[in-house]
Amino acid sequence: MKKNIAVIILAAGRGERMRSAKPKVLHPVCGRPMLAYVLDLTRALKIKNQVIVLGHKHEQVRKIIPSGIKISIQKKLLGTADAVKTALRQLRNFKGTILILYGDIPLLKKEAIGKLLKYHVDNNLDATLLTAQLDKPSGYGRILRDRYASISGIAEEKDADDFQKDIKEINTGIICFNKERLIAALNKVRPNNRKKEYYLTDTIGILYKNNYLVDGVRIADINEALGINSRQDLAKANRIMQQRINEELMKKGVGIVDPDSAFISFGTQIGEDTTIYPFTVIESNVKIGKSCSIGPFAHLREGTRLGNEVVAGNFLEIVRSSISSKTFAKHFCYLGDSRIGKSVNIGAGTVTANFDANKKSSTVIKDGACIGSDTILVAPVKVGRRAITGAGSVLAKKDVGDGEIVVGVPARPLTKKR
Ligand code: UD1
Ligand code: CA
C-alpha cells in the first residue's frame, strides 16, 4: 500500500459533447461504464487515499463507486482546477503526492501510472505530467516547452494559437503533484480563458514561473491516453478495449475466427477450445463452457450460462437462460428465461414465448429432449426428459411428460411414447 500517495478522480463534468441524458462516465465501454475501468486502475495501484469528484447527476454515478472511495460533490462545474480544490477538502491531513486521474480516460494501464509515479518521486519533482505524442492532437491540451525544452505550461485547444495548435505533444490529463505546491498554484488559477473555467492545467505554467520543478513522462502506447469526449471517441475506446479482451481470451485458448467482428463484453468467461464465429455479440454477465461453438450471428445476452460442448449457432438470441452440456441450438431461435438440460436438440426456429405482455415466465426443458423445428413454447411450460415436440407445435402452457411426444396446435400427446 502506497502511504504518501493520494488519488483524485475527476468525474463531475456534464459531458456535453456526448449529447446524452446519461452522465458521460456511465457510458459503457465493452459492456461496463467507462468509470469502472478507472476504478479498477486505482484498485490495482493499491492507493489507500482516494477521492472522486462527482457533480452532474451524481446520484446515478455514485451507485458504482465502491465504499472505500470518498466522494466529493462539486456543486458548480467551474472547471478541473475547482474540481481538484473540492477534492482536497477531504485530504486536509494528507501530506505527499497527489495523483490526478480523469473519469473519462478508461484505457490507461497501471504500468504507465506506476512509471509516472516513480519518476515523480525519484526525481523529487513538484509536478509530473503524463504526456503523449499524437499525429492528430486536436481536442487535447498542448504541452508548451521553453528554449531549454523544459515544460513551461499547457495550452488548451480552445485557447491555443495556430503555432501552439501544431504541437503534437499533448497532456493526457494524468498529473502527479506535490500537494503543497498544488494548493499554492490552485489558488492562483483564474478563469481567463474561452470557457471561463478554472483550468487545472494552468497550474503547470504557474509552477514553472515560480521556478518549481515540472517534468513529463511520455506514454508508450498512445491508445491508453484516449480521453472520451464524444460518441466518436467512445466508439474508438470500444474498439481498443475489444481488441484487448479478445487477445486475452485467445491467450486462454478461446478461438475467435474474426476478432474484428467478435463483440464480447468485459469479464465474459469462456472455456478453452470454444470457438466464436464472426458477428457474435456477447453482453455482460455471460459464462460459456469449454468446446462450445458460438455463432455466426449469435446474440448472447445477460444471464446466459452455457455448459461444455454446447452449440449456439446462427441467428439466435439467448437471455437469462442456462443450457447444459452437449445441447445443440444450431439455427435461428429465441431462448429466454429458460433452463435447458443436457443433450437437448433445439430445432430451427424454436421460440420460448416468455412474455405475455405483462410478466415474464420460464421454460424448462429436461435432458435428452428433442424440440422439433418451429416449436413455440408458451411459458410457463416444462418439457420432460427425452420428450419430443413435433415440428410446428405450440405448447400452450401445457407441460410435456418424460418420454412423451406431442404434436400440433395446441400440442396434444401422441399415444405412442418414445
Ligand atoms: C482535459 C484537459 C486537457 C487534456 C484532456 C485529456 C483541462 C483544463 N484540460 O480537457 O489538457 O488534454 O483533458 O483528456 O483540464 N471535470 C470535473 N469538473 C469540472 C470540469 C471537468 O470534474 O468542473 C472532469 C470531467 O468530468 C472529466 C475531466 O474533469 O472527467 C476532464 O474534463 P473535460 O471537460 O473532459 O476536459 P477536456 O476538455 O477533455
Ligand atoms: Ca475529457
Image: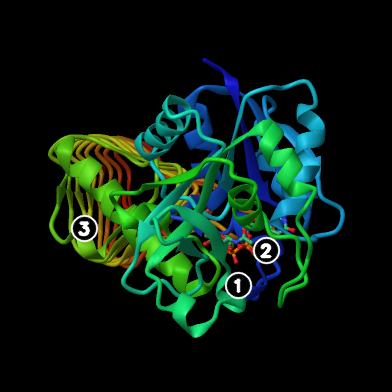
Q: Residue at x 52, y 57 (%)?
A: 152
Q: Which residue is mark 1?
A: 18
* Residue 283 visible (yes or no): no
Discs 2, 1 touching: Cβ within 8 Å: yes
Location of the C terminus (image quadrant): top left
Q: Which is nearer the eye, 377 or 48?
A: 48
**In 3D space, how far apart are the residues under numbered discs 3 and 1 (Cα atoms)?**
39 Å
**Number of the label disc, if any, that sits on residue 371:** none
**Quadrant of the rendered image containing residue 260:** bottom left
Q: Residue at x 68, y 22 (%)?
A: 95
Q: Residue at x 67, y 63 (%)?
A: 22
Q: Sort mark 3 into few (<14), some (14-19) or many (20+) by Cα contacts within 10 Å.
A: many
Q: Would you say 120 lies left or right of 343 here?
A: right
- Looking at the rendered structure, the kind of residue marked 2 is Lys
* Rendered image coloring scheme: rainbow
Q: Which residue is mark 2?
A: 22
Q: Sort mark 1 into few (<14), some (14-19) or many (20+) by Cα contacts within 10 Å.
A: some
**In 3D space, how far apart are the residues under numbered discs 2 and 1 (Cα atoms)?**
9 Å
Callout in the foreground (3, 2)? 2
Q: Would you say 295 lies left or right of 118 here?
A: left
Say what secondary structure mark 1 lies in.
helix
Callout in the foreground (2, 1)? 1
- Looking at the rendered structure, the kind of residue marked 3 is Lys
- Looking at the rendered structure, the kind of residue marked 1 is Met
* Earlier sequence position, callout 3 versus callout 1: 1
Say what secondary structure mark 3 lies in.
loop
**Against 174, is 123 above or below?**
above
* Earlier sequence position, callout 3 versus callout 2: 2
Q: Which is nearer the eye, 47 or 61?
A: 47
